[in-house]
Image (cartoon, rainbow, N blue to C red):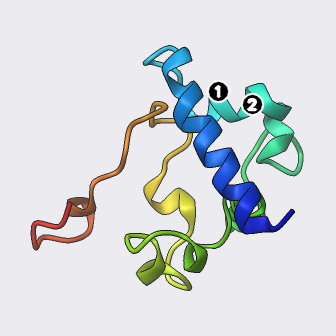
């Protein structure tokens, strides 16, 4: 099965199942339920110094920024997932807003 198809299936499963999670469940808690803290962190506890390991973990399931939608593609090579998606602070279903970095009214 291709990486793209797996990513699409995972995304669909998340979209369908996110309503089953508490609104106050963080993205980190959601991901930890799938494989513990080790699903994102090499040592299972703390982030790597440069965030590169965690970024690779995101891409291993969700695909690269270049493979994603038009909101993600322009950031390929410039940002890591955690630059916008703060795993321990954002809740499941919560989306970052572009105005955190862009002041041109993007949504």
Q: Residue 12: percent from the left, percent from the top?
A: 59, 43
Could you classify mark 1 by the number of other residues whose Cα lies within 10 Å: few (under 14), some (14-19), or many (20 or more)? some
Tell me: 107 left or right of 50. left
Comparing 94 with 18, the one in front is 18
Q: Secondary structure at mark 1?
A: helix
Quadrant showing the C terminus: bottom left
Instruction: Say which quarter of the image contains residue 63.
Output: bottom right
Comparing 23 with 46, the one in front is 23
Q: Residue 44: percent from the left, percent from the top?
A: 85, 39
Tell me: 96 left or right of 80. left
| On screen, residue 86 above or below 57 | above
Quadrant showing the N terminus: bottom right
Q: Secondary structure at mark 2?
A: helix
Q: Residue 21: percent from the left, percent from the top?
A: 55, 17
Q: Label 1 belongs to which residue? A: 29
Instruction: Say which quarter of the image contains residue 29.
Output: top right
Residues at marks 1 and 2 touching, judged by CB atoms closer than 8 Å: yes
Q: Is residue 49 visible?
A: no
Q: Label 2 belongs to which residue? A: 32
- Count of marks overlaid on the render: 2
Tell me the residue at 46%/69% (across/down). Answer: 69
| On screen, residue 87 above or below 81 | above
Q: Residue 59: percent from the left, percent from the top?
A: 71, 64
Tell me: 61 left or right of 66. right
| On screen, residue 65 above or below 90 | below
Q: Is residue 59 visible?
A: yes
Could you classify mark 2 by the number of other residues whose Cα lies within 10 Å: few (under 14), some (14-19), or many (20 or more)? some
Tell me the residue at 60%/47% (across/down). Answer: 11
| On screen, residue 104 above or below 60 | below
């Amino acid at each position: 099965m291709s990486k793209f198809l797996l990513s699409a299936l995972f995304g669909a499963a998340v979209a369908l199942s996110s309503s089953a999670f508490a609104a106050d469940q963080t993205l980190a808690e959601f991901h930890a339920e799938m494989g513990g803290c080790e699903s994102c962190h090499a040592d299972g506890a703390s982030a790597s110094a440069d965030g590169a390991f965690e970024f690779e973990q995101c891409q291993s399931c969700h695909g690269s920024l270049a493979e994603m939608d038009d909101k993600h593609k322009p950031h390929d090579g410039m940002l890591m997932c955690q630059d916008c998606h703060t795993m321990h602070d954002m809740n499941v279903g919560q989306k970052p807003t572009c105005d955190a970095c862009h002041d041109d009214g993007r949504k």
